[in-house]
Image: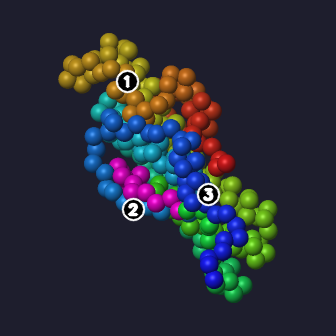
């Protein structure tokens, strides 16, 4: 009997739409080496969060750890890096706990198979620039792992749709907060560097002029986005709510 398909399934169109809607991150000024890691996302949340958040976080953490460190106090940069690591550790722990809890419910209710997606998986090779990038990639992979577990439990009526939505939203918020926090820090540090350049006539280390655009390693954040960050009087930026203008690509999946 000829193979008969009773429903139309995705042939890669979903991934194409996700990728087409996102502005490509500009890595042309990044001269650092990266470790190439094959990565696979299957869930809607995993795909969209990877595309929208991962490269933005990489650019911002590179700016913080590499570029800002050349102009600002190293202790201040270390404090920012420690805060980002703490945020990553916290969301990683939350995801591990959620995965362990879901697996325990699978065992308790005799569920032996996990729901799978009919959409084509997003397979990419990722260039990881730093330990922060590697940790964030792990966080995104765990979010992607958790999503079908929750949906399976909802299908079997082990947990309610409302409970799934609440847990999903809380975890997604934590993941977004890491990327938003890194951007918040990068914008604050860039403002400090620009202010230093203005006070010293734009002269950087070694007596060479430092063009303002060369300080913008996050590539794509204009002056309006910078003005969205509260002025902290030259102190190290603290994590907090990020202005809408500075978070245009940090939104919920469609």
Give the SS element for disc 1. helix
Left or right of residue 181: residue 156: right
Rendered position, 7 above or below 51: below
Residue 27 position in % (x across, y down): 37, 39
Q: Quadrant of residue 228?
A: top right
- Of marks 2 and 3, which one's residue comes earlier in the chain? 2
Q: Which mark is residue 213?
A: 1
Name the residue at 61% across, 57% down.
44
User: Mark 2: few, some, or many residues within 10 Å (few <14, many ≥20)?
Assistant: few
* Mark 1 vs mark 2, CA separation in Å: 32 Å
Q: How many marks do you count on the picture?
A: 3
| Residue sitting nearer the eye, 119 or 102 | 119
Tell which residue pokes out farthest to the front in this image. Answer: 1
Give the SS element for disc 3. helix
Name the residue at 57% across, 60% down.
11
Give the SS element for disc 2. strand
| Magenta residue span | 121-134
* Mark 3 vs mark 1, CA separation in Å: 35 Å
The mark lying in front, picked from 3 and 1, is: 3
Residue under label 3? 44
The mark lying in front, picked from 1 and 2, is: 2
Residue 38 position in % (x across, y down): 39, 62
Name the residue at 41% across, 52% down.
133
Residue under label 2? 38
Residue 96 position in % (x across, y down): 56, 68
Rendered position, 82 above or below 164: above
- Of marks 1 and 2, which one's residue comes earlier in the chain? 2
Tell which residue pokes out farthest to the bottom in this image. Answer: 110
Identify the coloring: rainbow
Left or right of residue 55: residue 246: right
Rendered position, 246 above or below 160: above
């Amino acid at each position: 009997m000829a193979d008969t398909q009773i429903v139309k399934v995705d042939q890669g169109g979903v991934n194409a739409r996700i990728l087409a809607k996102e502005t490509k991150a500009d890595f042309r000024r990044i001269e650092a080496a990266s470790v190439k890691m094959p990565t696979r996302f299957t869930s809607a949340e995993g795909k969209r969060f990877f595309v929208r958040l991962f490269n933005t976080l990489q650019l911002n953490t590179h700016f913080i750890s590499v570029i800002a460190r050349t102009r600002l106090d190293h202790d201040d940069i270390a404090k920012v890096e420690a805060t980002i690591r703490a945020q990553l550790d916290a969301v990683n722990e939350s995801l591990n706990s959620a995965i362990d809890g879901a697996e325990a419910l699978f065992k308790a209710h005799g569920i032996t198979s996990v729901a799978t997606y009919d959409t084509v998986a997003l397979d990419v090779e990722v260039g990881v620039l730093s330990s922060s990038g590697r940790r964030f990639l792990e966080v995104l992979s765990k979010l992607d792992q958790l999503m079908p577990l929750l949906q399976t439990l909802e299908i079997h009526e082990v947990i309610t749709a409302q409970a799934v939505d609440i847990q999903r939203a809380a975890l997604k918020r934590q993941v977004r907060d890491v990327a938003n926090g890194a951007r918040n820090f990068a914008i604050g540090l860039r403002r400090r560097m620009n202010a230093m350049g203005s006070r010293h006539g734009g002269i950087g280390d070694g007596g060479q002029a430092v063009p303002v655009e060369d300080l913008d390693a996050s590539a794509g954040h204009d002056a309006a986005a910078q003005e969205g960050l509260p002025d902290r009087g030259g102190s190290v930026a603290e994590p907090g709510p990020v202005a809408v203008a500075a978070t245009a690509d940090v939104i919920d999946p469609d």
